[in-house]
Image (tube, helix red, strand yellow):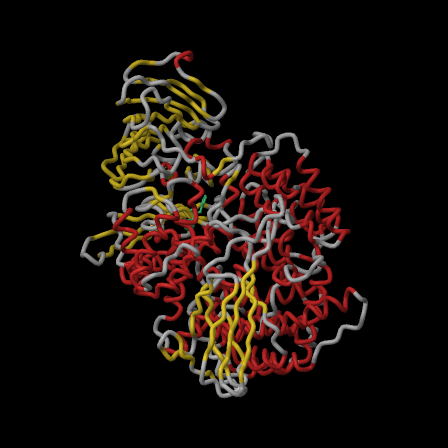
């Protein structure tokens, strides 16, 4: 463990490594207590003569170092906590290093570790150095040949990247396998897996007719839950061929499920390691949401094979080069899968639902991050611990920045840019600028005289920009002027600097339509074309566009399909919003109008709660909700999104100072009111959706939409204390034939007033599913997020035999869910103390996970005074912890600045 003296690493300090490392040979003598790693590295000097050879290492015991055949004594090399340095004189060097590590003691889940009875590795970002001394940086790319040896009974399967060259038995019940990966790769893409698994596989032919084998490995006994993952993988392979012309470049592609995993999954070349929650699914144990998440993550990791692995990052500041791009690709994959086989209208709605869900995720996690002390550009300028920069900004905002390039270039232009990117950079480690250069080469051809210079600012600037819209209608000329102006407040560390001049403007693609007073679209003439939606390219602080032939005062439909990650300011009247919510032809903007109506209503309630005034709900608001609920033209999936109130975190961001109790109270009151006032319609929706899902289970958009509407209706009825709510929820819970219905029933029971029905169902659920860890995670989560749950409940649940902090999924299911998603329970001085206790406990076990929890309240300075003070004290207590990891120290230091 290190303390907060950790150095800050700056993007501008990048230096190329002075050696090339074409070939790596590794021999593993695997054992859970102690594994021996023998590495043979063949370096070629490319930097200055006499350049020292610096290797990274962490938590390793060094056995021997041999340089060009000569065994070195301790005086011949330099060894400290983090590096091993040798001083070669020749230009061609062979270095043989033998070291030991202790997998069973490794609770960080970085490097070589034990999960269940199996051995796994996790190397991104800097975990390979926990396996062997190595230039552990992504711009050093090598061919790996790996020999794995281990006890055959214990580790019948020995897997690594690439192709299996040979396997053979050894004396003493051991065996070995030799793997060779033909593709040069950085160390962070290395992986090995040793253990006992069952395997589901499928032979495929790639577009060019090559044979390949897709395999999904999971714990014995779970082989009946891997069909969806394997099918998703096959679909992902096909999709990348069709949409991007990218083929699988390996003879076999393996996915292995691990119970203990810090993140979602990892794209190791040819050997993806997955959190089991993103692999295992069957209708009885996985919800519709899990099915979709599995498809998305399987796609994501597979797509990394090109965007990340074939072309990788030069340094970790470029993380969004692979992550933003790959998230964009997985979003598009999921959208295409959801739209597959539907009519044009249904497909548009299905895509809109996906877009709504992605934007909701962005606003829930990334907008707050971009307004807090950890705010950073998608290409950060500096970090202390790279593990802290696997953020919603790098991933989700990064994907938005790619999506804007897609919008600016169009589908075929974007494809041409991607082709150019691979033509230029296949096989190398590059930067975000390299990516934009490839896209710009196409953009310039499409738009002579223009370039992406202003657009690049998105890579350097933190904060969510605001775009203010002004509309001037000239009735005499029948013309309409639209003026857009942009502004981005200083955020995070920017606020600590000298007051600086305003940030430079960005290029913001702003999609816009106009509606007449009946809600009909008005065709707009823009750059020689007649269009329903125009994309304005705002690239200065303030710009005006004029449209002719506008018969009457129009209503603007703004930022259609969320064409840029910005906040729009426009003074809509409530009536205009209601019109958009009923008629906008852009389904995203239509949803957005309804959300804006709900936000206004909720903020009024927040103010009333704070003023201790009566809580009134506008009848027109209830009518707007009724209209959506009754609109049979809308798909069930879309209706369920349109009838969901904006989340607490999104609302909190819109209040200053932030008042968690008032926000939770306002939302609760409005749900109760809507539940009560629209009860007959909720009942009807519940019943008709229920009869629509009697077919055999499928996670497809239609069925999932019906279930989501049904569960929403049930939740509203429970919120409104409907006399039948408990019975309906009980029936749905006990008679459920899939986990989506069962969880909907359980959540409604736990969240309604009759505590005994909830407790009984929880007991039943536990008994039923106690042997399935992923389902027990759900059991902890419903309780963690129930509005009635307090710190004492959570402390009791931590005493439950099924609870452990060591398993990240379990820690997340209870601790994270409570701290981050239970506004009423967590935002108390007791809650903040509890949170600090858990950060400290996790710190000594798993710094990556601890640092994520440490971020829970990092926006404390915007809270109301009582909460602010309590949170600050808890941060200070964490800071005092004597063995604070670098990960947590960075978060705490930034939060307290
Ligand atoms: N690179 C992984 C992904 O996005 C995420 C990850 C990062 C996993 C670090 C493990 C450790 O697909
Ligand atoms: Zn990724």
Q: Is residue 830 left or right of residue 847?
A: right
Q: Quadrant of residue 607?
A: bottom right
Q: Is residue 766 left or right of residue 54?
A: right
Q: Quadrant of residue 237?
A: bottom left
Foreground: 324 or 174? 324
- List the single residue furthest toward the front: 477
From the viewer's perspective, is residue 358 above or below residue 861? Answer: below
Foreground: 732 or 656? 656
Foreground: 882 or 753? 882
Count of numbered circles on the image = 0
Q: Position of residue 104 (x, y in %)?
A: 48, 32
Residue at image coords 35%, 44%: 430
Quadrant position of the C terminus in the picture:
top right
Res. 334 visible in picture: yes
From the viewer's perspective, is residue 807 above or below residue 735? Answer: above
Q: Position of residue 567 (x, y in %)?
A: 56, 64
- List the single residue furthest toward the right: 612
Quadrant position of the N terminus in the picture:
top right
From the viewer's perspective, is residue 5 above or below residue 517? Answer: above
Q: Position of residue 376 (x, y in %)?
A: 53, 48
Q: Is residue 667 left or right of residue 472?
A: right
Q: Position of residue 759 (x, y in %)?
A: 67, 60
Res. 235 visible in picture: no
Foreground: 649 or 340? 649
- List the single residue furthest toward the left: 209
Q: Quadrant of residue 120?
A: top left
Residue at image coords 70%, 59%: 656
């Amino acid at each position: 463990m290190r303390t907060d003296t950790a150095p800050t690493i700056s993007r501008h300090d990048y230096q190329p490594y002075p050696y090339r490392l074409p070939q790596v040979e590794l021999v593993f003598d695997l054992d859970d207590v102690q594994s021996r790693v023998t590495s043979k590295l063949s370096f070629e000097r490319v930097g200055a003569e006499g350049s020292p050879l610096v290797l990274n290492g962490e938590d390793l015991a060094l056995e021997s170092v041999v340089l060009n055949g000569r065994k070195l004594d301790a005086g011949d090399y330099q060894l400290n906590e983090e590096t091993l340095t040798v001083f070669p004189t020749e230009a061609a060097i062979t270095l043989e290093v033998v070291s030991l590590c202790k997998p069973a003691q490794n609770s960080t889940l970085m490097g070589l570790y034990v999960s269940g009875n199996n051995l796994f590795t996790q190397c991104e970002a800097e975990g390979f150095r926990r396996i062997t001394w190595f230039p552990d940086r992504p711009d050093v790319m090598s061919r790996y040949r790996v020999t794995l040896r281990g006890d055959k009974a214990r580790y019948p399967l020995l897997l690594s990247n690439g192709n299996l060259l040979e396997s053979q038995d050894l004396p003493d019940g051991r065996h070995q396998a030799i793997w060779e990966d033909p593709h040069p790769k950085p160390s962070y893409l290395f992986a090995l897996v040793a253990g006992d698994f069952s395997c589901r596989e499928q032979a495929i032919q790639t577009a060019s007719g090559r044979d390949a084998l897709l395999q999904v490995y999971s714990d014995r006994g779970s082989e009946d839950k891997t069909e969806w993952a394997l099918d998703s993988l096959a679909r992902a392979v096909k999709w990348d061929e069709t949409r991007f012309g990218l083929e699988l470049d390996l003879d076999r592609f393996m996915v292995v499920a691990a119970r203990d995993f810090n993140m979602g999954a990892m794209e190791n070349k040819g050997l993806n390691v997955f959190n089991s929650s993103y692999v295992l699914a069957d209708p009885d144990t996985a919800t519709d949401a899990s099915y979709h998440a599995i498809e998305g993550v399987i796609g994501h990791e597979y797509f990394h094979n090109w965007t990340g692995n074939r072309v990788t990052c030069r340094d970790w500041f470029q993380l969004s080069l692979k992550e933003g791009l790959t998230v964009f690709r997985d979003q598009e994959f999921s959208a295409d899968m959801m739209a597959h086989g539907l009519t044009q209208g249904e497909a548009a709605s299905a895509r809109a639902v996906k877009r709504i869900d992605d934007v909701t995720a962005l606003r829930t996690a990334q907008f707050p991050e971009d307004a807090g002390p950890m705010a950073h550009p998608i290409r950060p300028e500096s970090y202390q611990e790279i593990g802290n920069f696997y953020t919603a900004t790098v991933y989700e905002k990064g994907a938005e920045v790619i999506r804007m390039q897609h919008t600016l270039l169009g589908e075929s232009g974007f494809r041409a840019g991607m082709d150019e990117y691979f033509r230029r950079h296949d096989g190398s480690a590059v930067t975000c600028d390299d990516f934009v250069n490839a896209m710009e080469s196409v953009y310039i051809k499409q738009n002579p005289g223009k370039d992406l210079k202003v657009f690049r600012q998105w890579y350097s600037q933190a904060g969510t920009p605001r775009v203010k819209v002004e509309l001037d209608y000239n009735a005499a000329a029948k013309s309409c002027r639209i003026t857009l102006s942009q502004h981005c407040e200083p955020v995070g560390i920017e606020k600590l600097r000298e007051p600086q001049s305003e940030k430079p403007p960005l290029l913001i693609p702003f999609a816009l339509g106009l509606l007449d007073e009946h809600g009909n679209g008005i065709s707009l003439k823009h750059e020689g074309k007649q269009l329903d939606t125009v994309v304005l390219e705002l690239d200065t602080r303030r710009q005006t566009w004029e449209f002719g032939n506008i018969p009457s005062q129009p209503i603007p439909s703004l930022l259609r399909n969320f064409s840029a990650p910005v906040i729009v300011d426009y003074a809509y009247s409530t009536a205009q919003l209601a019109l958009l919510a009923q008629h906008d032809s852009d389904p995203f903007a239509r949803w957005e109008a309804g959300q804006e109506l709900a936000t206004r209503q909720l903020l009024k309630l927040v103010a009333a709660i704070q003023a201790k005034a009566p809580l009134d709900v506008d009848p027109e608001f209830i009518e707007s909700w009724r209209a959506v609920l009754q609109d049979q033209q809308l798909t069930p999936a879309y209706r369920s999104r349109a009838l969901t109130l904006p989340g607490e975190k999104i609302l909190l961001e819109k209040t200053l100072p932030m008042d968690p109790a008032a926000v939770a109270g306002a939302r609760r009151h409005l749900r109760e009111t809507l539940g009560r006032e629209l009860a007959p319609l909720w009942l009807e929706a519940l019943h008709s959706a229920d009869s629509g899902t009697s077919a055999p289970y499928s996670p497809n958009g239609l069925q999932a939409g019906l279930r989501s509407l049904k569960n929403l209706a049930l939740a509203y009825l429970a919120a409104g204390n409907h006399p039948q709510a408990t019975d309906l929820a009980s029936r749905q819970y006990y008679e459920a034939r899939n986990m989506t219905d069962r969880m909907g029933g359980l959540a409604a029971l736990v969240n309604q007033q009759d505590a005994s029905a909830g407790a009984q169902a929880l007991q039943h659920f536990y008994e039923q599913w106690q042997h399935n860890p992923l389902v027990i995670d759900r059991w902890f989560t419903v309780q963690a997020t129930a509005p009635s749950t307090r710190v004492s409940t959570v402390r009791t649940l931590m005493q439950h035999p099924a609870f452990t902090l060591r398993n990240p999924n379990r820690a997340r299911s209870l601790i994270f869910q409570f701290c981050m998603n239970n506004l009423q329970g967590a935002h108390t001085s007791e809650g903040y103390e509890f949170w600090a206790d858990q950060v400290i406990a996790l710190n000594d076990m798993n710094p990556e996970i601890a640092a994520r929890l440490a971020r829970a309240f990092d926006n404390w300075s915007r809270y109301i005074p009582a909460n602010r003070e309590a949170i600050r004290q808890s941060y200070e207590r964490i800071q005092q912890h004597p063995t604070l990891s670098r990960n947590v120290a960075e978060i705490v230091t930034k939060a307290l600045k």
